[in-house]
Image (spheres, grey):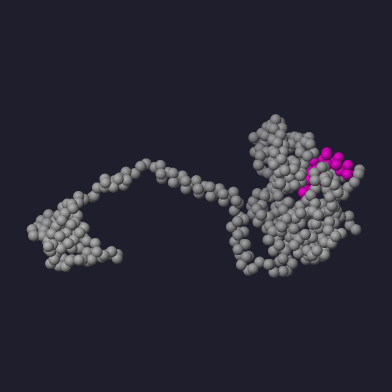
């Protein structure tokens, strides 16, 4: 509200008081009402016109009165709440079913007490915050990833892996099924006495004592430094030796 | 017959001061949904009288209350313009006023004219609205009697002239306007919406908006020249 608005409101207040106090000089409401409804003729009408040309207070009242008259000539639809209030006053049951009342109460509690500008402002603030956070995350310092995912050819394993085919006799079979995924661990010994422990998907297709050949991927180092070596890996293909 | 004011059919194309006055061809007082057509016969169709309706309301006629309700809402909502309430808050205030009128408040009206009744009704509604904002600790309109703005003193320190001088200058400026512009200024100051002003003046809302904008700019320029802004 700028100063013109404030001055205008004071001016209106002054005029209202003036119209109340100077009843001998200002036009009465009754006369203004007759004038507004074209109920005056001739000299009386001219006198009122002349007075309205000179008196701002009476003109303000006339403008308001004319608006009131126009409003009752074509009244708008009655608000449901007022209609309900009158029904209650007249001792009649509201027309709404029993559940519309709590719904209406809830609507009024949610809708009426928070100004629309506050809701819009809050929504805008949340949107701006989200956008800012999103932008900050995107434009922050680049994270050094250990692997360039865009070119799988550059993937490097944590341990050196050796694809190898080994052959030997199955020395043990253990079930390694977990969480519904069927797997087993197979051990075999070759002619040199070295042991290979391999993880294999699915159920075992060989049994203890079978001679087999296994294509697998092995880790580079043996798991122990003394005695016969033990190698471990993952079986890719398993077949019986001929 | 009491000297009440009756709504007349349009006597001429224009109302007072050249602006057209909009009037309904139907019986306006009994246009509420549940009023019976018999109550709004041919002779009463236009001359049906709000004061007569008020008398019937005081006598406890339910149909009269139903017919009174839309008129009460129109006048009441106009009285609440300067409070800038939400529609729900307006409904709250008007419901409370309606209840108090029904409980006997309407009997306190002693006037004899429609204009006096409007004044009475608006005073009741505004008083209840002031209580409402005080209860809620909300903004109170500055044009309410005794509720002057506290920002005026700060305005004084920012500008060269005191409010009283500027107020007098504004009064002179408004008095110097053409009658049509004076009415536009007053309608705007009373919080009329542009479409309402357009309905009163018979001009398109866009024309009204630009006329008002030019008018206010002129007033601001004059006040600025005098050191009031």
A110 w.r.t. B183: above or below: below
Residue A131 magenta-drawn? no
The structure residue drawn at horizontal position 80% and vertical position 48%, both measured from the top left corner, is B21
The structure residue drawn at horizontal position 44% and vertical position 46%, both measured from the top left corner, is A134
Extreme residue in the left direction: A192
- In which image quadrant can residue A148 be found? top left
Describe residue B112's horizontal placement relative to residue B96 as left or right: right
Extreme residue in the right direction: A43
The structure residue drawn at horizontal position 17% and vertical position 66%, both measured from the top left corner, is A206
User: Whole-percent x and y of residue B195?
Assistant: 71, 46
Location of the C terminus of chain B by quadrant is top right
B166 w.r.t. A242: above or below: above
The structure residue drawn at horizontal position 32% and vertical position 43%, both measured from the top left corner, is A144
Of the pair A26 and A62, the residue shown nearer to us: A62
- In which image quadrant can residue B40 be found? bottom right
User: Whole-percent x and y of residue A121?
Assistant: 55, 48
Of the pair A240 and A184, the residue shown nearer to us: A240
Describe residue B94's horizontal placement relative to residue A192 as left or right: right
- In which image quadrant can residue B56 be found? bottom right
Of the pair A114 and A136, the residue shown nearer to us: A136
B55 w.r.t. B175: above or below: below
A227 w.r.t. A43: above or below: below
Principal secondary structure, stretch drawn in magenta? helix
Q: Is residue B150 visible?
A: yes
Residue range (magenta): A44-68
Location of the N terminus of chain B by quadrant is bottom right
User: Whole-percent x and y of residue A209?
Assistant: 12, 67
């Amino acid at each position: 509200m700028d100063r013109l608005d404030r001055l205008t409101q004071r001016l209106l207040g002054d005029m209202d008081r003036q119209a109340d106090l100077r009843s001998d000089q200002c036009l009465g409401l009754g006369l203004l009402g007759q004038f507004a409804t074209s109920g005056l003729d001739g000299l009386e009408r001219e006198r009122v016109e002349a007075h309205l040309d000179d008196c701002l207070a009476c003109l303000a009242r006339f403008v308001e009165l004319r608006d009131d008259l126009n409003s009752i000539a074509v009244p708008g639809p009655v608000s449901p709440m007022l209609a309900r209030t009158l029904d209650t006053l007249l001792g009649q049951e509201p027309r709404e079913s029993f559940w519309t009342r709590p719904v209406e109460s809830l609507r009024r509690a949610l809708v009426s007490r928070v100004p629309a500008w506050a809701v819009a402002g809050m929504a805008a603030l949340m949107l701006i915050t989200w956008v800012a956070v999103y932008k900050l995350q995107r434009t922050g310092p680049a994270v050094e990833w250990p692997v360039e995912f865009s070119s799988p050819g550059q993937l490097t394993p944590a341990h050196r892996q050796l694809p190898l085919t080994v052959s030997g006799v199955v020395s043990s079979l253990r079930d390694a099924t977990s969480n519904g995924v069927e797997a087993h661990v197979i051990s075999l010994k070759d002619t040199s006495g070295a042991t290979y422990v391999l993880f294999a998907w699915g159920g075992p297709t060989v049994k203890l004592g079978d001679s087999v050949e296994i294509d697998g991927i092995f880790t580079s180092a043996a798991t122990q430094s003394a005695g016969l070596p033990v190698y471990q890996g993952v079986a890719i293909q398993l077949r019986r030796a001929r | 017959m009491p000297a009440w004011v009756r709504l007349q059919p349009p006597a001429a194309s224009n109302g007072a001061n050249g602006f057209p006055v909009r009037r309904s061809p139907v019986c306006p007082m009994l246009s509420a949904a549940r009023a019976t057509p018999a109550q709004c016969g041919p002779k009463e169709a236009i001359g049906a009288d709000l004061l007569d309706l008020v008398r019937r309301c005081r006598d406890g006629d339910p149909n009269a209350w139903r017919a009174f309700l839309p008129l009460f809402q129109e006048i009441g909502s106009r009285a609440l313009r300067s409070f800038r309430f939400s529609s729900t808050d307006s409904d709250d205030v008007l419901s409370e006023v309606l209840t108090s009128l029904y409980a006997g408040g309407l009997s306190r009206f002693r006037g004899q004219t429609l204009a006096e009744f409007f004044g009475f009704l608006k005073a009741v509604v505004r008083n209840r609205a002031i209580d409402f904002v005080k209860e809620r600790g909300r903004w109170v309109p500055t044009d309410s009697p005794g509720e002057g703005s506290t920002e005026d003193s700060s305005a004084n320190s920012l500008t060269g002239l005191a409010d009283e001088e500027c107020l007098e200058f504004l009064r002179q400026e408004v008095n110097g306007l053409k009658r049509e512009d004076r009415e536009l200024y007053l309608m705007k100051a009373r919080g009329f919406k542009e479409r309402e002003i357009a309905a009163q003046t018979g001009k398109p809302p866009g024309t009204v908006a630009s006329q008002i904008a030019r008018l206010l700019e002129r007033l601001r320029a004059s006040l600025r020249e005098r050191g009031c802004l």
